[in-house]
Amino acid sequence: MLEILREGPGWAVINKPAGIATERHFQYDTVEARAQVQWQRAGAKKAAYVGIVHRLDRPVSGALLLARKKSVLIKLNQAFAERLTQKVYRAVTQQPLPAANGELVHYLGRTPDRKKAFASTRPVPDTQEARLSYRLLREVDGRYEYELQPVTGRFHQLRIQLATVGAPIVGDLTYGNMLPLRDNIIALHAYSLAFPDPGTEATIEVEAPLPDYWPLPL
């Protein structure tokens, strides 16, 4: 069962568990597959509608917005495209970022096999600008917890940007961290999400509690 943090007419914000993908893929366990089962009405001939508004990587947990109607999906997609939404993440690293507070700017592309991202400090062909702001929340026993706020939404953006400045996220073996957390889980959590209500346009803010395996005391 997916944990629903908040819902309204035609949408729901769930607390995505780490370790599963967002979109349905064959018969694998995914958020979309779980939602279709969970939202299926008894006796209904058609499968329940699940609209993917945005995505969280498989090893990432936290607040994820889903649409339950096509018309709502269109409105929410427009809000994301117009940057009327705000996403805030928490991440734990074993190395500090360049300052207690700051901004990271890189140009991101994807490797030839499309499975990983790479970052450059200057524009190169087939890259897009990526920006995020960060602030240090606490340091405990040589581990650093940061609040991250992406300005752009690129493939593996937070993971590759932190790794590029020498602070890969705990558990992220893909991008150079050597401290396993759990299988297919890293210390990156979508902590809060703000977006305009598709019906009233009032701002909705939702927080997702940190998971119990978080590598710092809760």
Image: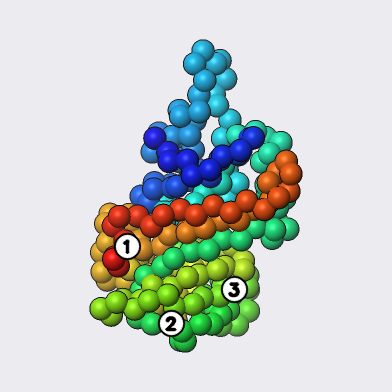
Question: Where is residue 130, by image quadrant?
Answer: bottom right
Q: Nearer the viewer, residue 32 or 89?
A: 89
Neighbor class of circle 1 (other Cα within 10 Å; few <14, some 14-19, many 20+) is few
Q: Residues within 10 Å of mark 3 (few under 14, many from 20)?
A: some
The Cα–Cα distance between marks 1 and 2, rounded to whole angstroms, is 22 Å
Name the residue at 56% across, 56% down: 193
Give whichever of discs 1 and 3 has the lower sequence position: 3
Q: Where in the figure is residue 70, as x and y percent of width and height?
A: 67, 35
- Kind of residue at disc 2: Leu
| Nearer the camera: disc 1 or disc 2 | 1
* Residue 186 percent coordinates (x, y): 35, 61
Q: Which mark is residue 218?
A: 1
Which element is circle 3 on?
A: strand
Seen at 57% across and 50% down, the residue is 54
Q: Which mark is residue 97?
A: 2
Residue kind at label 3, given as amino acid type: Arg
Q: Which residue is mark 3?
A: 131
Residue at point 43% right, 34% down?
A: 34
Q: Where does the image place residue 50, in percent across and percent down from the top left?
A: 56, 35
Q: Are marks 1 and 2 in contact (CB under 8 Å)?
A: no
- Give the Cα distance between marks 1 and 3: 28 Å
Q: Earlier in the sequence, mark 1 or mark 2?
A: 2
